[in-house]
Amino acid sequence: MRLLVVEDDLTLAAGLIEGLGREGFQVDHLAAAEPAEAALGHTAYDLAVVDIGLPGMDGLELIRRVRRRGLLTPVLILTARDGLDDRVVGLDVGGDDYLVKPFLLPELLARVRALIRRSRAAASMVLSLGPLSLDVQRHSASLGGEALELTGREWEVLEQLVLAMPRVVAKQKLADSLSQWDKEITPNAVEIYVSRLRGKLAGSGVTVRTVRGIGYRIEEEAPDAP
């Protein structure tokens, strides 16, 4: 699982990276909100750990912005502010949990695991688009009631598209989501998997549209006019 740590205290960040790494997480670190906003828009993170007191744009504004964009990545807020009002504001803008500094690493790890479990439970629903049905928890798909055979990479691309619908998914974000399968995946390689998906969806009334210069969107095809 891939996490993003947004923390400008480099000593604390190094400790988080080491501790989370020992638990088997792949951790990216950024020290400011502006690049973190871009990273969250292009990379499929399982969770973000965000400090409020960042230079420039603060962590609250970062969370507010990513939630406005419809991103559902779980966010654990880190802060030295321990007032009730501060906690309420942090949760109201879109944070999922709140941890006050100083804290012990075992508590942070426990909260991270709990947030990821909660996020996965929320995603355990069956998603549908016309004849296409995806069971996110079981990693299974069907088309018109018949099982749809997909490779691991094809499933990853299809899942990202369906979870985002009706929004467009950036080609780079799809490439990043495939990094767990192959670190050499590039945006151009994503076209191969999208093409294969189109072939498997052909004739079903569901298609993957290319939004030039941005990425892809999955949608139902309009019926032919009589």
Image (cartoon, rainbow, N blue to C red):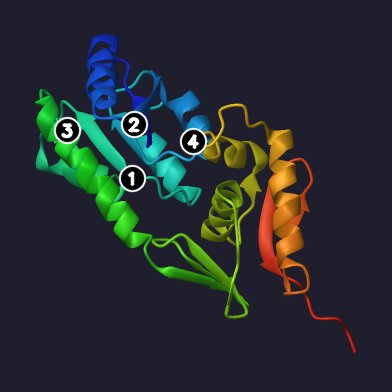
Tell which of 146 and 60 is nearer to you: 146
Q: Most extreme residue toward the right, as rendered? A: 226
Q: Residue 59 — which label?
A: 2
Q: Amino acid at mark 1?
A: Pro
- State the SS at label 1: loop
Task: Name which residue lies at 26% across and 26% down.
Answer: 20
Q: Most extreme residue toward the top, as rendered? A: 11
- State the SS at label 4: loop
Q: Quadrant of residue 51?
A: top left
| Label 3 sits on residue | 108
Question: How many tags in the picture?
Answer: 4
Report, in whole angstroms, how far the alpha carbon at label 3 lies from the one at label 2: 18 Å
Q: Compare marks 1 and 3 and give the one earlier in the sequence.
A: 1
Task: Name which residue lies at 61% across and 56% down.
Answer: 167
| Label 4 sits on residue | 180
Q: Compare marks 1 and 4 and give the one earlier in the sequence.
A: 1
